[in-house]
Amino acid sequence: MDKYLKMFKPAMTKWLLDHYPPEEAKKRWKKTVYLDEKWIREEGDLGGKKNPMANNMLEAYAFFAFYEAVDRSFTAEDLNGLIDAAMGKSIRMLSHFDMNRLLKHKWIVGAINRYLNSYKKKAEKYRGKEWGNTWVMRMNPDGHEKGIAFVYDTCPLNDFARKHGYIDFLPNLCYIDQITCSAAHGKLIRHKTLADGDGECNYWILGDKETEALADAGSK
């Protein structure tokens, strides 16, 4: 079983038992595992451990497999509850980081940008090969002088969701970015997403006390 299903299993099986008789819950859990393993095998793992972004795809497989196994009756509210049950402790630990303070340090911003640039270069090298349809990325195309900014022009989660008919549920997964950023006292300003058909996902990450963060409305 994939590591993400192992992580989510307690919360997912609890949800199943809350909504179905025991035998039916067991049947639907088996379908979840089957679909997750099938997609990893057939759709690929984007290079696995060699690709620092691959975990996002593996996490998505787990959620989409569960969504399908329960006849797509799993709502955004259900997902938020599951995330809190399975990952809430780790997410809350992000509160020890304060993006308002950290992103004031040029060396920290520089280190993050170097890491992102390293991924970008590797993705360009391995995309279409070992890393499959991994993300196509541009760094700070709008020239923001604060925080961290980048754009994804493609996203394998979006490709997968559109291929399998899950695009209605994908924005719920995208919102996890907002949850994790907010937990670290940050603000993700993102007005375009591939999930909503905008042609790109534009990320601008600031501390949540920055003027632009406080003035922002409508981020996805």
Image: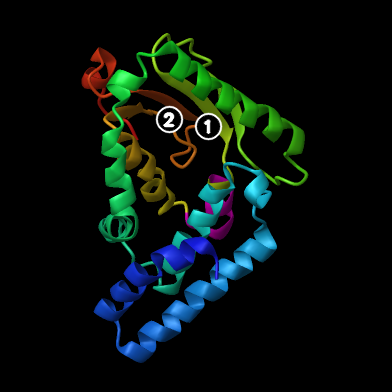
Residue 116 location (% of width, % of height): 56, 27
Q: Is residue 183 visible?
A: no
> 158 or 115, which is in the foreground?
115
Instruction: Check if residue 121 falls in the magenta segment.
Output: no
Left or right: 151, with 129 as reference point: left
**In percent of the image, x 53 and y 15: which residue is there?**
141
Q: How is the image coloured?
A: rainbow
**In percent of the image, x 40 and y 54: which residue is there?**
169
In which quarter of the view is residue 76 placed?
bottom left
Residue 204 location (% of width, % of height): 41, 23
Tell me if residue 71 comes above or below residue 185 in the rendering.
below
> 44 or 94, which is in the foreground?
94
Q: Specify few, some or many for label 1: CA neighbours under 10 Å numbering under 14, 14-19, or 20 or more.
A: few
**In percent of the image, x 47 and y 14: which residue is there?**
107
Left or right: 133, with 24 as reference point: right
Tell me if residue 163 comes above or below residue 8 in the rendering.
above
Q: CA distance from mark 2 to mark 1?
A: 8 Å
Residue type, mark 1 in image? Gly
Q: Specify few, some or many for label 2: CA neighbours under 10 Å numbering under 14, 14-19, or 20 or more.
A: some
Q: What SS does tag 2 mark?
A: loop
Tell me if residue 97 comes above or below residue 14 in the rendering.
above
Residue stretch rendered in magenta on the structure:
158-166
Residue designated by label 2: 192
Name the chief secondary structure element in magenta.
helix
**In percent of the image, x 75 and y 47: which residue is there?**
130
Label annotation for residue 199: 1
In which quarter of the view is residue 146 placed?
top left
